[in-house]
Amino acid sequence: MVEIETRKDTQVFDLLHKELERQRQGIELIASENFTSLQVLQAMGTCPTNKYAEGYPGKRYYGGCEVVDEIETLAIERLKKVFNCTWANVQPHSGASANGAVFLAVMKPGEKFLGLDLSMGGHLTHGSPANFSGKTYQAVHYGVTKNGYVDYEQLESKARAEKPKMIICGASAYSREWDYERIRAIGDEIGAIVFADIAHPAGLIASGLLNDPFDHCHIVSSTTHKTLRGPRGGIIMLRHDFENPWGIKDPKGNLRTMSQLLDLAVFPGLQGGPLEHVIAAKAVSFGEILAEDFRAYSKQIISNAQAMARSFVNRGYNLISDGTDNHLMLIDLRNKNLTGKKAQETLDKAHITLNKNAVPFDDKSPFVTSGIRIGVPAVTTRGMKEDHMETVVEMIDKILMNADDENTIISVRADVKEFMKQFPLYPELGPLI
Ligand code: DSN
């Protein structure tokens, strides 16, 4: 860690201090966020940020890589244990970069793939027209049924009709389990690659609490900073490396195994120098996941999410699919005469942070939306249990039912600040990071 005396840039460090205080005082319910351990944070602020290491351990384009080789190898070996897989790439800078590399490895521009529609809970990189995935490749989509579950019949009929080269399963705003086996069966029937993006539920999968995609999906990608509670970043994994039956070639026209295609796609295909300080922090977080208490943390996430979902339902909120199997829930606010935008902005004023989100079959624009997405990984890290979920929902409900009343906002903001004192964040850091 940088010592306080060396911090001359007060302008930036004052802002970092402000952000730390914001994180400490607020209730963080953004489903894709979490708080790393102090040692993960410390590993990130270290000297490998100074090092170029293009290539992979033992095969670099720069000298002086012997130590970062050890760091990256340790990260890979730990990650392989976390997901019981045989190959992993820890270099993607983000989940979007990991997905970009998967596309680059297996798809030619213009080829077709099938993914969950963004407006139904999917992700930008699963074929949004605004994203490289929708611009470079031909995206077709499946959705969810009226009751909020993935429409597997639609997925199967679209797969048969469209014959995509790849089917993506995974989502950003979906609170239910995935039937990877069923998706693989349709993939096999039409000869498609099945790719799971587990960025959201990865920690719950690593803990054995949700279905395991690895035996059914050819390729799996994730972020490292959500339920995995690591630093901001991406990863790609294979449980079983394989000669690719699709005859996909590398840029030189050689047939390669899937792991070789993916390695080539991350570097030199998409990225240059890996962020070895972040990879060091990934290694630390993978070590934490391998420790016994991570499973207990993951169990608490699901338990908290279900307690929170029940509490919202009891107050007349309309949850998509009526509940959750994982760490998040999606709420349709139309019966409360509120938009997602209004809810997000009002809750923000009381230091309760979440995001507006389109709900399936939404009639409002993505800038307004009819819903909000709520996740509990971050508050679970802070130490909250089921009973605290009731208190949090009570505060949210008070704000939403009095969204134009400044006095209510001021009073709940004070309650939030007081409430969060029970759940210290990085106390070792004192007032400054
Ligand atoms: N932006 C992330 C999320 O909030 O789910 C996904 O990349």
Image: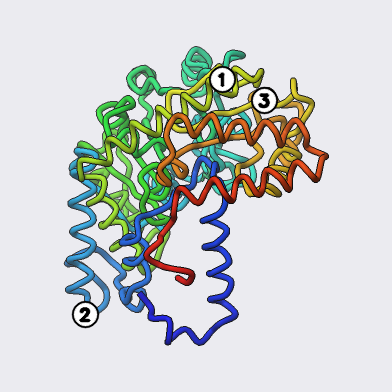
Q: Mark 1: give few (<14), some (14-19) or many (20+) Cα within 10 Å.
A: many
Front residue (pair 58, 11): 11
Front residue (pair 180, 81): 81
Q: Is residue 182 above or below residue 91?
A: above
> Picture coordinates of residue 207 (x, y %)?
27, 34
318 lies left or right of 111: right
Q: Which label number is shown at residue 332?
A: 3
Q: Quadrant of residue 237?
A: top left
Q: Which label number is shown at residue 144?
A: 1
> Picture coordinates of residue 353 (x, y %)?
61, 46
Front residue (pair 351, 123): 351
Mark 3 or mark 2, which is nearer the start of the sequence? 2
Q: Secondary structure at mark 3?
A: strand
Q: Which label number is shown at residue 64?
A: 2
Q: Is residue 90 above or below residue 136?
A: below
The amino acid pointed to by label 1 is: Val
Q: Quadrant of the C terminus?
A: bottom left
Q: Secondary structure at mark 2?
A: loop
Q: CA distance from mark 2 to mark 3?
A: 54 Å
Q: Is residue 428 above or below residue 342?
A: below
Q: Secondary structure at mark 1?
A: loop
Does the Cβ of the disc 1 residue fall within 8 Å of ligand 1? no
Residue at 41% from the left image edge and 60% from the top image edge: 426
Q: CA distance from mark 1 to mark 3?
A: 15 Å
> Picture coordinates of residue 64 (x, y %)?
21, 80
The amino acid pointed to by label 2 is: Gly
Mark 3 or mark 1, which is nearer the start of the sequence? 1
